[in-house]
Amino acid sequence: MKPKPYGDPEKLVFGRTFTEHMYTIRYSEGKGWHDGKIEPYKPFVLDPAACVLHYSQEIFEGLKAYKSTNDRILLFRPEQNARRLNRSARKLCMPELPEEIFLNAVKELVLLDQDWIPDAPGTSLYIRPTMIATEPFLGVSPAKEYLFYIIMSPVGPYFKSGFNPVSIYVEDELVRAVVGGVGDVKTGGNYAASLLAGVKAEEKGFYQVLWLDAKEHRYVEEVGAMNVFFVFGEKVVTPMLTGSILPGITRDSVIKLAQELGIELEERRISFDEVLEGIKTGELTEMFGSGTAAVISPVGHLYYKDKDYYINNNKVGKLTKSFYDHLVDIQLGRAEDKLGWSVEVK
Ligand SMILES: Cc1ncc(COP(=O)(O)O)c(C=O)c1O
């Protein structure tokens, strides 16, 4: 058998290994999108005055390709990523990319570099579509030239030591995003703004931050790269989209899956006091995060204002596990795709 180009999948570190090829397409005002092509993965030549380097006109997406049964390759709801990219583009005054260009480029690139999709349990090929403003000028106004590109990275199993609950640092001082800002789209600046809290959390031994709202520091927003869900009694509750939370595609999938499975689910504001009260009374029985990287990640421990709070004795809850199993089964093509979420690359 041919050796795998990415080596041992267990040793893959997220986002450190890239496949052989990338897709690029350029935009210029008056000409539109042009010169779309797949080429070998290589560094770009960028003018030092390129707009993206000074004023952060940049947006990106993240999705995965999975090896399925019978040598099939599946994408999970990629049209949602194409749509969200264009929402981000509108907010950052960047040109929208026709959805079919996005989808065809993803499919063609995955097909070409298909040997890079790991097939061990829990592994996948992470796909990173990105758009940057390339026009060289200094000054705060929308650029007239852009580059859209796609790179891909094989990823090892997210849960290396099994599907276990994670511990999360609740940030009560710094904020990620404000209503009316750009927190509800995927632009690099949001992540740069989150680094300081991440470092603070890491110093205390935590690798993820739970953000509260910017105005009152009272309502639960989301985790670094995941939306969050709580189970109060038998009811699943998730923060409503107020304008500062990223509308996650996994979040939307959990909501639709709950409908399908007849599980009661509510989108509303959730105060952190309510979470603490729920933990105290035992009404809050589960908490989990949702996102492309982990799919579903159980949360068993919150650290807030120097105190530890444990949910469900730091054990994985029933609904958390059920959402994880259902989603992974659909993504891998092991369960019937009743909601039409899988897109075949081949
Ligand atoms: C800030 C943020 N929230 C939530 C998510 C989850 O979104 P999705 O389910 O589309 O991956 C992500 C990941 O993309 C994210 O970066």
Image (tube, rainbow, N blue to C red):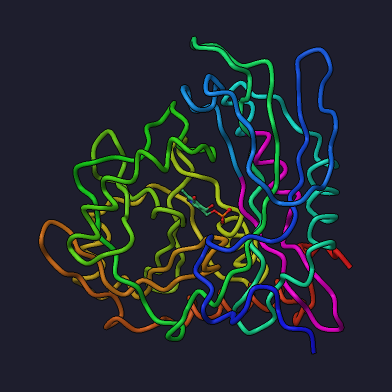
Looking at this view, name the residue that lies furthest to the left.
306
In the displayed structure, 276 sits above or below 37; it is below
The quarter of the displayed image where residue 292 is located:
bottom right
* x then y, percent, for residue 22: 73, 50
In depth, the one of 193 and 339 nearer the eye is 193
Residue visible at 72% across and 62% down? Answer: 76
Looking at this view, name the residue that lies furthest to the right.
346
Residue visible at 33% across and 60% down? Answer: 208
The quarter of the displayed image where residue 283 is located:
bottom left
Magenta residues, as a range? 61-87
In the displayed structure, 151 sits above or below 259; it is above
Please tell me whether residue 74 belongs to the stretch shown in magenta. yes
The quarter of the displayed image where residue 101 is located:
top right
Residue visible at 51% across and 65% down? Answer: 14
Describe residue 330's horizontal placement relative to residue 171 as left or right: right
Please tell me whether residue 285 belongs to the stretch shown in magenta. no
Quadrant (top left/top right/bottom left/bottom right) for the C terminus = bottom right
Looking at this view, name the residue that lies furthest to the bottom.
1
Describe residue 102's horizontal placement relative to residue 189 as left or right: right
Residue visible at 39% across and 55% down? Answer: 223
* x then y, percent, for residue 214: 29, 36
In depth, the one of 305 and 8 nearer the eye is 8
In the displayed structure, 155 sits above or below 174; it is below
How many numbered discs sit on the rendered protein? 0
* x then y, percent, for residue 335: 75, 80
* x then y, percent, for residue 204: 17, 63
Quadrant (top left/top right/bottom left/bottom right) for the N terminus = bottom right
